[in-house]
């Protein structure tokens, strides 16, 4: 299956949950990442239950605070 992650195509042998995908692609700081699948932001408690399928678009987003 082919999945677009942060604008780049990736190929996987089978469907994965969001949590499995985070681990498979070695996402750093997983506790701080926000995941968007097909333009929908997921709740963290759904990472283990949401399946990534062929053709899905996934974005890993990090929100940083700061400024004056």
Image (cartoon, grey):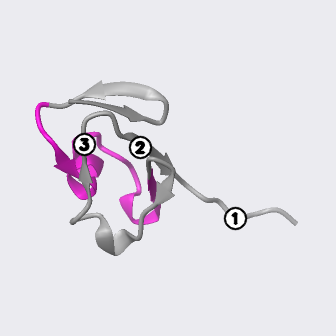
Mark closest to the chain's N terminus, 2 or 1: 2
Alpha carbon of mark 2 to alpha carbon of mark 1: how far?
23 Å
Residue 34 magenta:
yes
Check the picture and name the quadrant holding the C terminus: bottom right
Point out residue 11 in the picture as x, y percentages from the top left corner: 24, 26
Instruction: Name the image quarter holding residue 3.
Output: top left
Q: Name the residue under label 2.
A: 58
Q: Which residue is drawn at 25% across and 35% down?
A: 54
Marks 2/1 in contact by CB < 8 Å: the verdict is no
Mark 1 neighbour density, 10 Å: few (under 14) some (14–19) many (20 or more): few
Instruction: Name the image quarter holding residue 29.
Output: bottom left
Check the picture and name the quadrant holding the N terminus: top left
Instruction: Give the number of the mark in front: 1 or 3.
Output: 3
Is 58 displayed left or right of 54 in the figure? right
Q: Mark 3 points at which residue?
A: 53
Mark closest to the chain's N terminus, 2 or 3: 3
Instruction: Name the image quarter holding residue 25.
Output: top left
- SS assignment at label 2: strand
Alpha carbon of mark 2 to alpha carbon of mark 3: how far?
10 Å
Q: Name the residue under label 1.
A: 65
Q: Residue at x 20, y 52 (%)?
A: 20
Q: Which residue is drawn at 48% across and 36% down?
A: 6
Mark closest to the chain's N terminus, 1 or 3: 3
Is 26 displayed left or right of 61 in the figure? left
Residue 23 magenta:
yes
- SS assignment at label 3: loop
Instruction: Give the number of the mark in front: 2 or 3.
Output: 3
Q: Which mark is residue 7?
A: none
Mark 3 neighbour density, 10 Å: few (under 14) some (14–19) many (20 or more): some
Alpha carbon of mark 1 to alpha carbon of mark 3: how far?
32 Å
Point out residue 26 in the picture as x, y percentages from the top left corner: 29, 43
* Magenta stretch bounds: 13-36
């Amino acid at each position: 299956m082919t999945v677009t992650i942060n604008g780049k195509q990736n190929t996987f042998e089978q469907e994965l949950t969001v949590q499995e995908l985070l681990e498979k692609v070695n996402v750093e700081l997983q506790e701080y990442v926000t995941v968007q699948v097909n333009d929908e932001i997921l709740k963290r408690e759904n990472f283990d239950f949401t399946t990534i399928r062929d053709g899905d678009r996934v974005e890993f987003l990090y929100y940083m605070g700061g400024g004056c």
